[in-house]
Image (cartoon, rainbow, N blue to C red):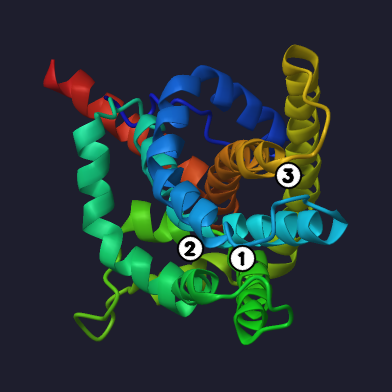
Amino acid sequence: MFIDQTEISIRERGKRELFDLALHVARRHFAPLCTALLLGVAPFVAFNAWALSDIPSDRYDGDSRFQYVTYMTLLVFIQTPLATSLMTIYLGQVLFRTQAMPRQLVRELARSAAQLLWYQGVVRGGFFVLLAAAFNDWNDRNTFAEFVIWSVALWALVARGVRPYLNEVILLERNPRRPTGATAMTTARRNAALHAGFGGDSFVQLIGAGILGSMAALSIWLTLCYLRAEFFNAIQTDRATLTVLLPIALWLAVWFLAIVRFLGYLDLRIRREGWEVELSIRAEAAALARSTAY
């Protein structure tokens, strides 16, 4: 593997071009990315189904449907960074055409698990949402647990809008959480330095991704409902429509947006650090070293 042999051309791109490139990456690496997502979301799918199972489901009237859709969406939003971690590691490895083996992906995830759980679970509140959802009585509206879920979701929205690439910093750059010297670069410092001056641009990209993700999830959900009605003559909004088809639609939208987020991280590094020039120089140096060796 040579430094100039990248899977994705390293150059600056506009926002619309990033979404277009994400489609090509999704097509080219469809099976591995789907496998990585399935492995990442499996525990969260089981947890969400269990945590929201107390919402009244005998008729699924308007209030119950709205409640289920709202909190399923919020839970998926909060869980996205942890659930897409394997996808991020896979994309980081195949960028330089490195063969990504399953054991290697799991090993790389284990190396960063402590920091990932700390920043996404504690600092950004993911664990508090899981606890609130697990112990909430969904028959009792306006509870403290629901307040916690909404508060953490709002905090996560702001944090991801200003500094959206924390996952990539943790999983791909692997800085220590605490400084080991006077000038040691920690994860927090690196995250702040990477996003400094680009908060507005990142927030605009979050808005675009949110609109696209919402439209994609809704389209997938309605399509699945239509196919279910056509093939199984099930036209009512029943339990399966919300507990099975809705999570599938949400996680498929998350799958695509995780690819967009990774490409946005690459683009930010190129714009901020001149990564395109750096890789070109390193590629020329490597080529010169190979030619002199012969």
Q: Which residue is mark 3?
A: 213
Secondary structure of residue under mark 1? helix
Kind of residue at disc 1: Arg
Q: Earlier in the sequence, mark 3 or mark 1?
A: 1
Indicate the quadrant containing the C terminus: top left, top right, bottom left or bottom right: top left
Residues 142 and 20: in front is 142
Q: Find residue 214 and report its horizontal and vertical position in percent.
A: 77, 46
Residue at image location 64% in from the left, 70% down from the top: 138
Residues 61 and 1: in front is 61
Q: Find residue 148 and report its horizontal and vertical position in percent.
A: 61, 81
Mark 3: give few (<14), some (14-19) or many (20+) Cα within 10 Å: many
Of marks 2 and 3, the one in the foreground: 3
Residue at image location 65% in from the left, 77% down from the top: 146
Q: Kindly check if marks 2 and 1 are in contact, taking CB atoms under 8 A apart as contact.
A: yes
Mark 1: give few (<14), some (14-19) or many (20+) Cα within 10 Å: some
Q: CA distance from mark 2 to mark 3?
A: 20 Å
In this orientation, does residue 100 appear?
Answer: yes
Q: Earlier in the sequence, mark 2 or mark 1?
A: 1
Q: CA distance from mark 3 to mark 1?
A: 15 Å
Kind of residue at disc 3: Gly
Q: Find residue 180 and report its horizontal and vertical position in percent.
A: 19, 80
Kind of residue at disc 2: Leu
Mark 2: give few (<14), some (14-19) or many (20+) Cα within 10 Å: many
Q: Which mark is residue 166?
A: 2
Q: Which mark is residue 160?
A: 1
